[in-house]
Structures are given as structure tokens and as C-alpha cells.
């Protein structure tokens, strides 16, 4: 049998017949019998396409490289023997077909070479019009990639899967949105699964074409997965979530939002098979009910510490389970639970299982009433932070007993709780033994400025921070009362309170014994220079932040007082105030001032004359707001920007 051996790998096979005289052009001369099949190794030459005659048959030399005609099975065996990441990237750059073949190979199927060292330089994979730069940016010790909008395609995911293999693999992947014509599908996610088994964090937002198949592939290959975030993924169902539960025992955090096909079965699997789960967030999933939520807690191995349940069809039963079995829960957020009644919150508090609860936030839950709120205060002995938003049935009768029962409470925020009145606020602050450090009131329309008849036993010496925003009835009378009750205030925010006057604010300034550090009076239209003069005189030695945005009656006299008395002021906002160039000159002449942020937005009295003074202030400034200063010319500001190149200037 005639034999033919090709060792070159890039040459053609020829058989039969005899060579013509032009065989000298193909190599060295020789005499060959016409009855023997011959392979003649050519010398280096330019590739030609002219036909060569062998006997009486014409053969046209192939223009295609021989390796391209190999079947995928052979290419697979070649690719899995590539020695390192650089070689894989080079092969992936040849064509989409080769890239897809490489991504079909699991990381464990590659042969390991002793001399295989990961490349530490930036690599680039260019496939057709899709280019993915593979860099060595690290976050917490692992490579991170984020694809958004049009950049999110299967081809890019495949490129990432191949390119990151030389850097130790991908650790975090975030896909937000999807290309409308070439959006991410299960194929792209499967490529990541096969190429990046070290993946620990996966976030999928608004990717309708990714379903259970892709997520199951992640579960099958990425056993180290710790965090999973699914948002607006309508094609992912319980099947995909069950696969994660069965294959990813290290899962510690799970977020599910607006996934219409995920329900109780998936959560039950997570509760039974993921003992290390510490954080769970479920929002707007109509198929999730009591069975799924209760299973997350009732498991004896439950280690949940952070729980967020929003807009779910759960009932009192789920809250009762949380109250009994949530022994490890430290942070709890409940929002939009329309089917939970007063009984559910009452049982949750009285069950005495939330002894480790530190932070509780409840929004738009009609079941929160005075009775249930008091029960939660007594049942959460270590509660430090409480936030109530849009709880329309909570009044003074429940709020004051709650604060008394929650003896460890340090921060209280009330937002749009319109049944809470001035009497309730005074009742909270006048309780002895209170540890409250921060009180925030936002849009509480039930607070009216009336003569206080509520007696208080002793001042609240623990309160350091008071924030009142857009409470239209909060006026000078209650402010003076709060000033007497809270002598240790250091941070005060009174924004959007048109009813406050100098007469109401001055008693508070005089009562603050510790020295104010931050003062925000934005939107208080009726305040005048008298308040600022008193503020700088009494607290100039401690004041670090002063916000007078929208106080239209504040003039140059206030800023002259600031320049003379404030030693440590670093952030000053006098937007929409009646100041002029004189104010800027006064600030620049104060040697003790080291302003870092100055806002002069919409100050029409500031003109080009202030530029030299602003340059002087610019030695310490890192932020300067000159928006809507109509008296400043664009050319002048451009020159200022060139001079203060270290300062971020808005114009």
C-alpha cells in the first residue's frame, strides 16, 4: 500500500502520475516512479493558484488554510490543548466560529501545562464588529465586568469568558439592559458558566431573553456563586432558582424583583438547600406567597440577617413566622404589604423572636396601627433605628408608647405620618432615660404650631441631630420648645419651613450648649441676617457646614459675620441669597477660613468684580457652583477655570 505522511501541516496532498519538468520550481529535483504515491515537501514560495497537472487530471490548489477545513471535533481537541490564555485569545480573534468553539469548552476540559502562566497584560479580543477589552481591573480580589444596553450581547459575553480565563477567571458579572437586535440570551450566559466557574456575583437586570436554561448552566458550573440579583427577568422561573439552590450551597445573598414566574417553589428550595443565606430581598413577585416566605425562616438552619419584603401577596402568617423564627434578623424592611393586618404586626412584635433586630423600616402598610406599633416596641428590645413611611394609622397614642418600649432606640424617622402631632413629638423628647440621638420628620402634615400644653419632665440630652423637612405646620412655637428640650443638638436641618422666623429660631440657637456643627436652613424664606449674626456669634467656633439656599433676605452682612467668626467652616451655600461682590471679598480676606465647597448659584449680585476674590478662595476650594450667576460673563469664568484647575466649577 502506498503511504503518505504530511508533517508540515500546511501542504497539499498529491497522488498518482509523474511530475513534469516544472517540478524544479516546487523543490529539489528527484526521479520518482510513476507507480508510487509521492509527497514532495516544497521550499518557501509565494502562494499561487495556477493548476498543476498530475497525469491526465486537473487539480486546483485550495485557497483555504488546511486547518479551517478540519471538523469541529478536531478543532475542539486542538483548542483544549492550548497552553495559555494568550493562545486562547489569539485563536478566539480569528473568527466567530472559533470563538464559539472555545466557549463551548469547559474550563476543566482544558489540558493543564506546567509552563502555563497567566498573562498580566491587557488583552483585546476583536471579533467582527464586537470588541471586548479584557483588562486586569480588580475589585475585592476578582475581575469585574459590567455590560449595559447595546454593549450587552452574546458575543461580548463569549469574549469575556475566553479573555478572563488567563487572569484567573471572572468573579463578578453585571448585565443591565440588552441589545434590542442582538440581546443577551441563554447562549451567552452559558458561555460565561463554562469559561468562568469562579463566578461569585451575578446580576441580571432587564434581560427578557435569558431564561432557566442559562441560569441552570450557571448553577451547574459556578458552584462558588455567593450573590444573585434578578430584576425584570420574565423568562426565569422556579426551575432556574431551584437549580441554583441545588448546586450553589455558598449562596449568601439573593435579590428578586419583578420576576413574574418565580414563586413559592423556588423560595422553598432556597430555604432548604442554602443554609448560608444571610440576605434576601423580594419585590413585586405576584407568585410569592406565605409558603415561600415562611420556608426561608422556618428552616432550623436559617441564618438570615437582612430581609426586605416589598409589594408581595403575603398575609399575617408570614409576619408571625418572622416574629417567631427570625432570631438572627438584624435588618428588616417591610413595604407595600396590603394583605397584612394589625394582627400580623402585633404577633410579630409579641412573638419575642426579633431580639437581635437593630433596624426596622415599614412603608405603606395599613396593618401598622397604634396597637401593633406598641407591640413591636416591646418585642424588639435592641431596636436602634426605626423608619415609618406613609403609615396613615399611626398617631401619638402609638408612637409615644413605642418609643418608651424600644429603650435602645437611637434613630427615629417619620415620613408622611399625618396623624402625628406636636404633642407626640414633645412626648417623645420629654421621656427620661431616652437614648434617642437622631430625629427626622418629613412631610408630616399633622404637626401644627400651637401653644404646647404637654408637660415634660426633663430635657432629652441624648438628641444630637434634628431634621425637619417640608413640614408646613412646623413653626416658631414648636421650634422654641424643641430647643429647650434638646440642649445637646449639633446637627440641625430645617428645610422648606416657611413658618419659621427669627424669633422662633433664636431660642434654639441659644439653647444649644454643645455647639452646632451643621446648620441647614434652606428654603426658610422668612429668616434674616439677625439669625446668621447670632449663629456665627454663638457657634462660629464649631460650625463646619452652613446652608442658606433660598433664604432671600440674607445679605452681605451675614457673610461678613461668617468671615469674622467662623473658624472651621468648610461648606457654605448661599444660593439665591441677596449677596453681592462685597460678600466674596469679605470671605477671601478671612485668613482663618479654609472653604472647600462654595455655592453661589443664582446670586445675581455676584459679578466679574468677584473673580480676583474667587481666585484667592480657590487655594482651598475643591467645589464652586456659579450656575445661573447672570452677572458673570462666560469668558471670565473660563479664565477662572484655567486658574483654578484643581477646583470643580459648575457654570
Image (tube, helix red, strand yellow):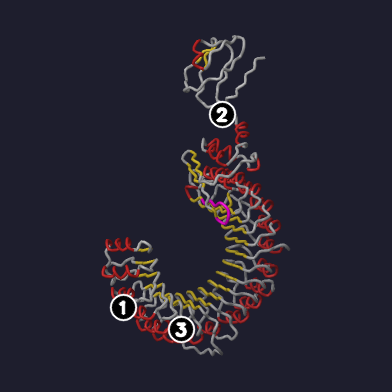
Helix, strand or loop at disc 2? helix
Taking 649 as reference, is 408 left or right? right
Disc 2 crowd rating (10 Å Cα; few below 14, some 14-19, many 20+) is: few
The picture quadrant where one finds residue 372 is bottom right
Whichever of callouts 3 and 1 sits on the residue coming sooner in the sequence is 3
Q: What's the mark number on residue 297?
A: none
Residue sitting nearer the eye, 302 or 104: 104
Residue at 50% x, 85% y is 487
Q: Which residue is mark 1?
A: 556
Report whether residue 185 is seen: no
Region of the chain picked out in magenta, as a range: 139-146
Location of the C terminus (image quadrant): bottom left
Residue 384 in the image: state x and y as whole percent.
60, 75
Residue 85 in the image: state x and y as whole percent.
57, 42
Residue at 56% x, 51% y is 143
Q: Which residue is mark 2?
A: 67
Disc 1 crowd rating (10 Å Cα; few below 14, some 14-19, many 20+) is: some
Q: Which residue is mark 3?
A: 479
Report whether residue 145 is seen: yes
Disc 3 crowd rating (10 Å Cα; few below 14, some 14-19, many 20+) is: many
Q: CA distance from mark 2 to mark 3?
A: 84 Å
Whichever of callouts 2 and 3 sits on the residue coming sooner in the sequence is 2
Residue sitting nearer the eye, 562 or 351: 562
Whichever of callouts 2 and 1 sits on the residue coming sooner in the sequence is 2
- Numbered marks: total: 3
Closer to us: mark 2 or mark 3?
2
Amino acid at each position: 500500500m502506498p503511504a503518505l505522511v504530511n508533517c508540515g501541516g500546511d501542504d497539499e496532498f498529491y497522488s498518482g502520475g509523474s511530475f513534469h519538468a516544472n517540478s524544479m520550481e516546487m523543490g529539489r529535483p528527484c526521479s520518482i516512479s510513476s507507480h508510487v504515491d509521492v509527497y514532495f515537501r516544497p521550499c518557501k514560495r509565494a502562494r499561487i493558484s495556477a493548476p498543476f497537472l498530475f497525469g491526465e487530471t486537473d487539480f486546483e490548489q485550495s485557497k483555504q488554510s488546511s486547518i479551517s477545513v478540519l471538523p469541529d471535533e478536531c478543532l475542539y481537541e486542538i483548542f483544549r490543548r492550548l497552553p495559555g490564555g494568550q493562545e486562547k485569545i489569539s485563536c478566539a480573534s480569528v473568527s466567530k466560529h472559533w470563538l464559539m468553539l472555545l466557549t463551548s469548552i469547559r474550563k476543566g476540559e482544558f489540558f493543564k501545562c506546567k509552563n502555563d502562566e497567566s498573562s498580566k497584560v491587557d488583552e483585546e479580543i476583536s471579533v467582527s464588529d464586537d470588541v471586548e477589552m479584557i483588562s486586569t481591573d480588580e475589585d475585592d480580589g476578582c475581575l469585574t465586568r459590567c455590560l449595559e444596553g447595546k454593549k450587552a450581547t452574546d458575543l461580548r459575553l463569549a469574549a469575556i469568558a475566553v479573555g478572563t480565563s488567563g487572569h484567573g477567571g471572572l468573579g463578578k458579572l453585571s448585565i443591565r439592559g440588552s441589545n434590542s437586535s442582538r440581546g443577551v440570551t441563554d447562549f451567552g450566559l452559558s458561555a460565561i458558566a463554562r469559561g468562568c466557574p469562579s463566578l461569585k456575583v451575578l446580576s441580571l437586570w432587564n434581560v427578557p431573553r435569558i431564561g432557566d436554561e442559562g441560569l441552570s448552566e450557571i448553577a451547574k458550573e459556578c458552584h462558588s456563586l455567593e450573590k444573585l440579583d434578578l430584576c425584570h427577568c420574565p423568562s426565569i422561573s422556579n426551575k432556574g432558582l431551584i437549580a441554583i439552590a441545588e448546586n450553589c450551597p455558598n449562596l449568601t445573598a439573593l435579590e428578586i424583583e419583578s420576576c413574574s414566574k418565580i414563586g413559592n417553589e423556588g423560595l422553598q428550595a432556597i430555604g432548604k438547600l442554602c443554609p448560608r443565606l444571610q440576605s434576601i430581598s423580594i419585590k413585586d413577585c405576584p407568585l410569592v406567597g406565605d409558603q415561600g416566605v415562611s420556608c426561608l425562616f422556618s428552616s432550623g438552619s436559617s441564618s438570615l440577617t437582612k430581609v426586605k419584603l416589598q409589594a408581595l401577596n403575603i398575609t399575617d402568617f408570614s409576619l408571625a413566622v418572622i416574629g417567631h423564627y427570625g432570631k438572627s434578623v438584624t435588618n428588616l424592611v417591610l413595604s407595600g404589604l396590603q394583605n397584612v393586618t394589625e394582627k400580623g404586626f402585633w404577633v410579630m412584635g409579641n412573638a419575642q423572636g426579633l431580639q437581635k433586630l437593630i433596624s426596622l423600616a415599614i412603608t405603606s402598610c395599613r396593618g401598622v396601627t397604634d396597637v401593633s406599633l406598641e407591640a413591636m416596641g416591646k418585642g424588639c428590645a435592641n431596636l436602634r433605628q426605626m423608619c415609618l413611611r406613609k403609615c396613615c394609622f399611626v398617631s401619638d397614642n402609638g408612637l409615644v408608647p413605642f418609643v418608651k418600649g424600644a429603650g435602645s432606640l437611637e434613630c427615629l424617622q417619620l415620613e408622611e405620618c399625618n396623624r402625628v402631632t406636636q404633642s407626640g413629638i414633645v412626648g417623645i423628647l420629654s421621656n427620661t432615660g431616652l437614648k434617642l440621638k437622631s430625629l427626622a420628620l418629613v412631610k408630616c402634615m399633622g404637626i401644627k404650631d400651637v401653644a404646647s400644653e404637654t408637660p415634660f419632665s426633663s430635657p432629652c440630652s441624648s438628641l444630637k441631630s434634628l431634621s425637619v423637612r417640608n413640614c408646613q405646620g412646623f413653626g416658631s412655637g414648636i421650634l422654641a420648645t424643641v430647643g429647650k428640650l434638646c440642649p445637646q443638638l449639633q446637627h440641625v436641618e430645617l428645610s422648606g419651613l416657611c413658618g419659621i422666623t427669627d424669633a422662633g429660631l433664636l431660642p434654639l440657637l441659644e439653647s444649644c450648649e454643645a455647639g452646632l456643627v451643621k446648620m441647614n436652613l434652606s428654603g426658610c424664606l422668612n429668616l434674616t441676617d439677625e439669625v446668621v449674626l447670632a449663629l456665627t456669634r454663638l457657634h462660629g467656633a464649631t460650625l463646619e457646614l452652613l446652608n442658606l439656599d433660598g433664604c432671600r433676605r440674607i445679605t452681605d452682612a451675614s457673610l461678613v459675620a461668617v468671615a469674622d467668626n467662623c473658624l472651621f467652616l468648610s461648606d457654605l451655600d448661599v444660593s439665591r441669597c441677596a449677596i453681592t461682590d462685597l460678600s466674596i471679598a469679605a470671605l477671601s480676606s478671612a485668613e482663618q477660613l479654609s472653604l472647600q465647597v462654595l455655592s453661589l448659584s443664582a446670586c445675581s449680585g455676584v459679578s466679574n468684580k468677584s473673580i480676583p476674590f474667587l481666585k484667592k478662595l480657590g487655594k482651598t476650594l475643591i467645589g464652586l457652583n456659579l450656575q445661573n450667576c447672570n452677572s458673570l460673563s462666560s469668558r471670565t469664568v473660563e479664565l477662572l477655570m484655567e486658574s483654578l484647575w484643581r477646583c470643580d466649577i459648575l457654570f
